[in-house]
Image (tube, grey):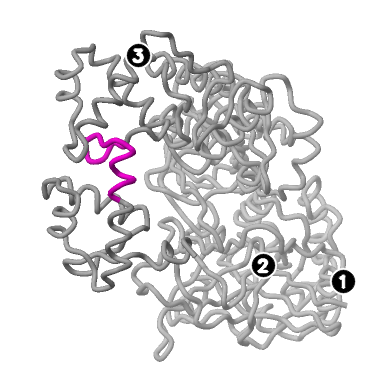
Amino acid sequence: MDKKHLIMGTAGHVDHGKTTLIKALTGFDCDTHKQEKQRGITMNLGFTHLDLPDGNSVGIIDVPGHADFIKTMVAGACGIDFVLFIIAADEGIMPQTREHLEIMNILGIKHGIIVLTKIDLVDTELIELAEDELREFVKDSFLERASIIKVSSVSKSGMDKLLQAITDNVEKIPQRSSEGAFRLYIDRIFSQEGFGTITNGSVLSGSISKDDKVYLLPGSKELRIRRLEHHGEEVNTVSAGDRASFNLVGLKQKDFTRGMVLSDRKIKETRLIDAKITIFQPDVSLQLWTQVIFLLGTGRLMARMHLLDKNSISSGETCLVQVYLPKPIIAVFGDKFIIRNSSGDLTLGGGEIIDPYPLHHRRRREEQIDIVKKLSSGDLKELVLAEIRKAPLPLLHTDIANKLNIQPDDLIDIIFRQLPGDIVFHQGENNILLMQKKFETATRNKILTGLQEFHKKNPLKKTGKTFNELMGIFGTEQNEITKMTLKLLLDDMQENGKLKHTNKSWALTSHDVNLDNITQNLIEKVESYLQNVGSNSVGISEIQIAINVDEKKLHQVLNYLVDNSKAYFLQKKYFHHDFLEEAKQQLVEYLQQNPDGISVAQFRDIMECNRTNSLIILEYFDSSSISIRRGNYRFLTKKFVESRK
């Protein structure tokens, strides 16, 4: 049987024996700081692990219980799979007992064991009273059916039962999925001589190996993993549910801060989130705009919170909010967070992120709030539709899955069976592109209108616009997504008979070149003129003077001659096809007889043209892979010689 990867945390009021209990279980004292020893309380997160009789090993996070260190407690609670909820028998339920339970509820922790400590300090009757009080206290919480284990860390009474309860919990708790993005909130940073920067944290999702890329977020700085550790031992891979230690190369210790994220991919940062919050603090009422301390993962920021569907919110109530952050964070749909008052001495409540990249709702428009309400329902179809409808550009289904923190395959049924009429999709080779119907219609119209205008201006051109020219319809939004969008739409419009692909360009199917007698005569006249000038290349102004024709019409005729290979337009000069063919023949014959090469002056004399035109022609032959320049001489290319065999 595969070993489980789980993390156990402690919770409870200060001085109720959390750290002492962990020491009794593991032999390790989590109070490692000098100040903690002096004050007799845990101020920082403590980390160790416990090897269980069945072969499993759980990571342990010991959190401080004192009110002054709630922010540290929340950082530790991030990523734990189950909790030892600790209450001292001689004191019972205390302020931080209540606060910690509420925080655990908000953070979505589902499993735990209630541990009644210090039973050696009270008699049996008080223990029974404490048990009754506890059962009432945890009613309607995730601990309602949890075991209550009575222990003494001093006498070791009940420790075997606790160890068995932990073992049983580990067996029944499902393993976190190692699929999807690897994410780890950094909760500890230090330097070690001979190694450099070390960062620790709990793996929230995914997995990563020593040879994989890892990014420090926000910032997307790519780092190299020198060493990976789990429970003090070097490993090649860490997965969801592991406590992990990263020895990283690429930045200094000062570049890391608690609250930053390690990930195997770049995740877009945000300074604005939509969320659903619940207030649990009694006698508290929050108004439309409130300043709060926002605790997400191991990070802590002052933030402004805007109520969306209510004008105020009190204890026990739930509300949709938009949170404004002072600097970028990494947040994912479904992440849980805690909010405290601006002075940091009171935990108000917390909630869940329902949109890490929302639209701005400052005016609280009804249609926007309706979208947020649908998002808050958690219905996957509504989540997908909301992502598409708020996006200014099409989205890949894999990108939507990443935003929603799910697997791409989870979206297939919705895409193929459940999309409403205002959403369309196009299937590419390896991905599915989704967009609003109005965006698709507008883009198709821009393509058709652009080609109509092009053909009107260039009636003698058989070709249309190139792919790159058509990309101009997206303005500044030219990226991989819009490239894919254009490609899929062009293919679809060709398949439906709207467009044709001709000579590396796209044209309207209805477009055809029809030459009337006047135009045909003008074409022959311009071509004859170019033949007659021979080696003396000419610009459009010279041709216009010689032919005496409207410039617009002349442009059309010259483009026609170029498109039909009757003329060449090189460096703003026109050459007739026959002259360039003769120049090519003369060059090849000379170089076949003179392997030492040909200079510009020699070519000029052969063709009886000026130096400028000689350079233009030779550079054209270079670009056509006929000749190659070495110093002051040109030679036939190997490719051209082989093509003549």
Callout 2 secondary element: strand
Question: Which percent across, then down, holds residue 47?
Answer: 59, 76
What segment carries the magenta color?
A: 568-583
The residue indicated by pointer 2 is 9
Q: Nearer the viewer, mark 3 or mark 1?
A: 3
Three-letter code for the amino acid on which mark 1 is drawn: Asp
| Residue at 42% from the left image edge and 78% from the top image edge | 197
Instruction: Please tell me in which quadrant of the rendered image residue 292 appears.
Output: top left
| Residue at 42% from the left image edge and 42% from the top image edge | 325
User: Reading the chain from its start, which is encountered first: label 2 or label 1?
Assistant: 2
The residue indicated by pointer 1 is 168
Question: Which percent across, then down, holds residue 482?
Answer: 51, 36
Q: Nearer the viewer, mark 2 or mark 3?
A: 3
| Residue at 68% from the left image edge and 75% from the top image edge | 59
Q: Can the viewer see residue 27?
A: yes
The residue indicated by pointer 3 is 521
Question: Which percent across, then down, holds residue 599?
Answer: 17, 63
Callout 1 secondary element: helix
Q: Name the foreground residue: 549 vs 593.
A: 593
Q: Can the viewer see residue 283?
A: no
Residue 269, numbered label: none
Dot 1 crowding, Cα within 10 Å, few <14, some 14–19, many 20+: few
User: Reading the chain from its start, which is encountered first: label 3 or label 1?
Assistant: 1
